[in-house]
Amino acid sequence: MNKMLWAWVILAGLMLARLGYNEIFASQTASPEVTATLLLTGGLLAGLLGVTGMLGMLGWIPHPRMK
């Protein structure tokens, strides 16, 4: 996988975490706290996965060979 894809994974994770952070501090929220917790946790884990992939530590993931 190329670095641009890993950067998009990091960006998506940060956006999910930001949505969860906004849900916690919103004055009028219709979603329960579990939703905010899942958004925060999922976003931070996605960002961590992206950083790990960008560093090359996920090189064992199979990818199709270009011919």
Image: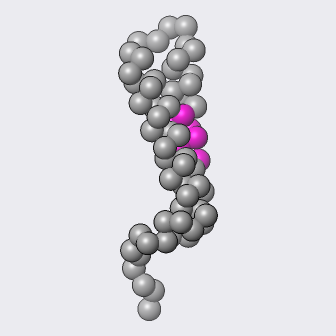
In the rendered image, residue 8, in percent from the top left (x then y), is placed at 56, 54
The extreme bottom residue here reads 67
- How many numbered marks have been drawn onto this rendered protein structure? 0
Q: Who's the residue at 39% across and 79% down the image? A: 64
Residue 12 in magenta stretch: yes
Which residue is more in the foreground, 39 or 60? 60
Q: Is residue 61 above or below residue 46?
A: below
Visible residue check, residue 5: no
Visible residue check, residue 46: yes
Instruction: Name the colouring of the figure.
Output: one colour
Position of 56 with respect to 62 (left or right) is: right
Which residue is more in the foreground, 6 or 48? 48
Q: Who's the residue at 59% across and 55% down the image? A: 51
Which residue is more in the foreground, 13 or 60? 60
The extreme front residue here reads 57
Residue 60: quadrant of the picture: bottom left
Residue 22 in magenta stretch: no
Q: Is residue 38 above or below residue 1?
A: above
In the rendered image, residue 25, in percent from the top left (x then y), is placed at 57, 14
The extreme top residue here reads 27
Quarter holding the C terminus is bottom left
Q: Who's the residue at 41% across and 12% down the image? A: 30
Prevailing secondary structure class for the magenta stretch in the rendered image: helix
In the rendered image, residue 21, in percent from the top left (x then y), is placed at 56, 25
Residues shaded magenta: 11-17
Position of 53 with respect to 32 (left or right) is: right
